[in-house]
Amino acid sequence: MFSLGRLSFMTVVSIWIAIAVKGIVAESLLEVHMLGCIKNRKSNNAVTFEVTLLNPNDTIVTGNIINYTNLVSTFTLNSKEIFIQRFDAAVEVIGSGLSRKGIKITSDGELLVYASSSHISQHDLGGYLSLPVRVQGNIYYVVTGKDNGVILIVGVWSNTTVEVSLLTNYNVTYNDTVYVNGSIIMETLDEYSTMQIYSTGDLTGTRINSSQTVSVFSGNRLSGTYPNMYHVVEQLPPLHLWGKTYVTAPPRNFTYHCKVTSSLPLTIVTYTCKGEARAFALAETGSFETLNFEQEICLLTSTEPILVTMMINNDTALGSMTIMSPLDDVTGSLMTYVSRLLTNAEIVIISNTSLKMEPASISPKFIECPSFLGYCITHLENLTGNTVYTITSGSGNDSFIASGFVHGQTATDDSTAYPLLYHTSASSAYNGQMEKALSLDNKTTTLAPEFYQDVISNTDQNLQKAPEQCKCCSFKNYSMEEIANYTKSLKKELTVNPNTTSKYLRTLSSAEDQRISSKFIGYTAAIVLGTLGACLLIADIGNILQMFRFIGRAFSNE
């Protein structure tokens, strides 16, 4: 009996372990992208949302495209092959509120995913390079255009709590409720949920905090009047993918300005253009500065990670926006796709080495290497749309440092821009510092003006002066007793009990995890443990029955 029970137990456990491992391995092999389409029209005319998949691997990649209702298509891609899926206006997220219009792409290998929204009759274009879910996070700071700013948050997992802390120069209406600067909008998202927030002004600096990973897109709705209408959109990287070293350079014959956003309080940013260094301080987390660089090449470095966003335009092309990737190591080759919608495209590459391009017929049209920079900027101009381009080091090295973006125009002078690559490395030390800085939740530490001034003056002789403090204040003399009472109340107000913070409270409970693999592991563990107990009980059932009979006879003899 015992041998039969042991055999039954080991057989059941082996089966369940095999099923669990198979499920975990299958899910871990999936590359997932979650996309959304921001509204890009003022009328009911046709909008096309186009998703392009590029296989950068040497092996075949297969996968699925799923929207909020059903499976849209399956694909099999050979190396360097592309697949284009077009959607109609039904996937466009309309209104400031909650809907369910996310688009999910799964594959058994890495993909480069490009998305663009084009409006045929109103001649506008907006696009972005998608970030895979595996590199996304749950803390973001928003960058938008100066007018008609918009945020789109797409749910990746079920039961995800999202908190949006507004920083805006205009009121925001969400679900028919008006919110002002500093307000917090709360929402719970499921997979494919789309939370869109409109403003008539700028939403740059707005913070997004979620309980689980979300995809975040920002830019602005279709603005202006025909023919001067424009629409920009980008996918935002989470804080842990921001960097400390950037080089910015515009496309040829274009001008640009940058929005620089801070990840931590009192971040010092130094920017060098034409060999002249200047600097400024970003006092709070999420604060930003707009720098008008015109046509200059500039090097930006910072004491803490920052986000650098380029706004590009010229006299003939309507505006475009791109998130700059910090300078990053590239191993092997760098691959990108120029959209079929572009008739006049340019790739701008910042690198520390000479470059070799494919197709072989491509040759650099313009290269500049400023002496103060230490990097060269390569402009590949007049590129053909619907083409894959491969970039490798021309010096024979297997790795090189690179950053850059693709910029292009349509036949109607609409323009778009998107990053050449996305930054994926993150420092664990930085993550720990970030968590420490954010552990006070919504409480803000105000820096003394003199401390702020000292940091500014000690950084660089060319630093910009800090803004004057409170010109409208009135002053009076206070007694020592008044000062003591005020100091006591201020200390009480600013003191935070560490046992009341959400960080501490989260240590007392397990965070909910909606991933399929996590649920499968939990159910498998419960079944295995239950089966273990049952098998042990079955193995000894004869002995247990014999024990009860012995006890019964003992009581009977008494």
Image: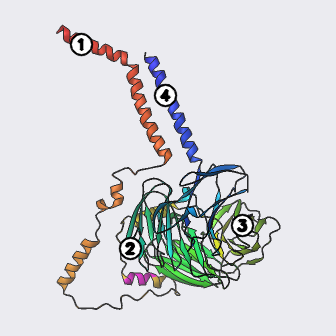
Answer whether residue 450 is magenta in the image: yes
Q: What residue type is labelled 4?
A: Val
Q: Is residue 166 visible?
A: no
Q: Which of marks 4 and 3 is nearer the N terminus?
A: 4
Residue 186 in which image quadrant: bottom left
Density class for disc 2 (Cα within 10 Å; few <14, some 14-19, many ≥20) is: some
Magenta segment, principal secondary structure?
helix
Give the residue pinned by disc 3: 340
Q: Earlier in the sequence, mark 4 or mark 1?
A: 4
> Measuring 29% from the left and 61% from the top, which residue is drawn there?
500
| Contact, mark 1 vs mark 3 (Cβ under 8 Å) | no
In the foreground, 389 or 428: 389
What is the number of the mark on residue 552? 1
What whole-number distance in Å separates the C-alpha atoms at marks 1 and 3? Answer: 86 Å
Q: Give the range drawn in magenta.
A: 449-455
Secondary structure of residue under mark 4 = helix
Q: Which of marks 4 and 2 is nearer the N terminus?
A: 4
Q: Residue furthest front?
A: 44
Q: Quadrant of the C terminus?
A: top left
Residue 337 in which image quadrant: bottom right
| Contact, mark 4 vs mark 2 (Cβ under 8 Å) | no
Q: Can residue 497 be seen in this view?
A: yes
